Amino acid sequence: MTSSGPKAFAGVDIPSDDIITNCMHCGLCLPTCPTFQLTGLEKSSPRGRIQLIKAVAEGKLGLTEGFVEEMNFCLDCQACETACPAGVRYGSLVEAARAQIFIQGAESWTSRRLKRFLLGWVFADQSRLKILAILLRWYQRSGLAWFVQKSGFLNLISRRLAATQGLAPQIRLEFSSETLAEVLPAYGERRFRVGMLTGCIMDVAYSDVNLATVELLRQHGCDVVTPRGQACCGSLTAHNGDMDAARAMAKNLLDAFSGQQVDHIVLNSAGCGAFMKEYGHLFAEDPQRKENAAALSAKCLDLTQFLARHGYRPTTTPKGASHGRALRVTYHDACHLAHTQRVTVEPRTLLAMIPGIEFVELPEASWCCGSAGIYNVVRYDDAHHILERKLNNIMSIKPDVIVTGNPGCMLQIEHGLRQEGLNIRIVHTAAFLHEACQI
Ligand code: SF4
Ligand code: SF4
């Protein structure tokens, strides 16, 4: 995969051999790795996978079925990066390995075609995604979804298809990219001009969260610019190895935001934020674009970073508190916020500022929930085993509300709560922070 020194692979900067060999085999990452904890197998651990990647890089191992399986079994949660004392950039290594697998067609034809069609083509243009969303909304609201579920029809076709139906996001009646004006002024004194990413899934399934984000920003002195022509940032596509398609999506967003003169681009999805903060490395072979991408990345902030840095003014307790007792709130760290962006303190600080809240720390809050992009769909059973640990931790503290900052985590945890019959509200950080700012 590499020989030595800094490399550009598939047009992407990837770690040099030095970084691969930085691994000193200490094993400190092993207890933090969900797939190692599931199997107990070295090959399913960060250390084991690094050895596999190294063997491929040195030409000692081909892109075998076993290699592909281990790269895809990894959640890319990057908990191992947080734990590693040697600074091994494991996430970049596994993503480079997946790009190699994709380019060389080492996966099955069906899987490759499906990824190219869905992640590389549908997600590349928001109008295509909206057509798919409208069809899904019709299926969900016409009663057909209810009928299919009750009849057990999907079980006859495929048990996995039946199980994954519960993971489908509820498509909203209105999409945020159509509801939001291109520029919305601050309420009161203007302090900043910020850019808003409406995203792909966030736009069609969590448009309410996007609207709450914009309102929150306006309440806190921001003119909010939502450039037209946006689509997916490319993170899902890149994590699945299709770097060319991901790069095209990044170019589209760079064009959408170019010339907007914003102080910050505020993000409310952990996966998008993590990817956009690293946009520069997508353009290793295009210096001009690389510079523009790095400039955009430098402006990217998670919503919680922005509010913690520039002030947050909650006024009231969000809904759900029982009479006479504080609202018991906990927080689940999305992997790409905690491990990739290292944002853990800010959300907790903001939550602690809300009146009438009893904040309860979730045991193993930064342990992956199993969502991991499309992992919970394509590897439902593995994801479900990982989710069980999260649910056990949730049950141990019995919160009223779980707050988290990534749509994938919300879908996965909500699915688990529903299956367990647990009446616990799960809400996006932006929506919860906004609820606390109602006049
Ligand atoms: S913690 Fe870092 S150095 Fe130690 S085995 Fe894991 S990747 Fe290698
Ligand atoms: S990214 Fe997550 S699942 Fe993959 S090796 Fe690291 S800790 Fe394990």
Image (tube, helix red, strand yellow):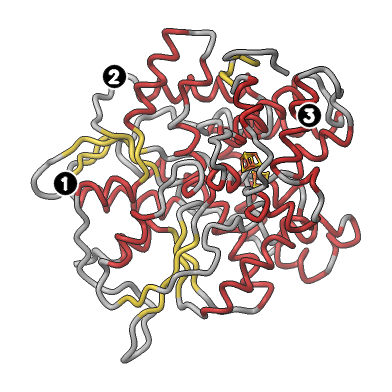
Rendering coords of residue 180 (x, y %) = 34, 42
In the image, taking residue 203 as reference, residue 221 lies left or right, namely left
Circle 1: residue type: Gly
Q: Which residue bears the numbered disc 1?
A: 221
Q: Which is more N-terminal, label 1 or label 2?
A: 1
Asked if ligand 2 lies within 8 A of label 2, the reply is no
Disc 3 secondary structure class: helix
Disc 2 secondary structure class: loop
How many neighbours does mark 1 have within 10 angstroms: few (below 14), some (14-19), or many (20 or more)?
Answer: many
Rendering coords of residue 120 (x, y %) = 65, 28
Q: Is residue 237 above or below residue 178?
A: above
How many neighbours does mark 2 have within 10 angstroms: few (below 14), some (14-19), or many (20 or more)?
Answer: few
Name the residue: 33% across, 83% down.
Answer: 326
Rendering coords of residue 415 (x, y %) = 64, 65
Instruction: Name the quarter showing ligand 2.
Output: top right
Check the image and name the residue furthest to the bottom.
324
Circle 3: residue type: Arg
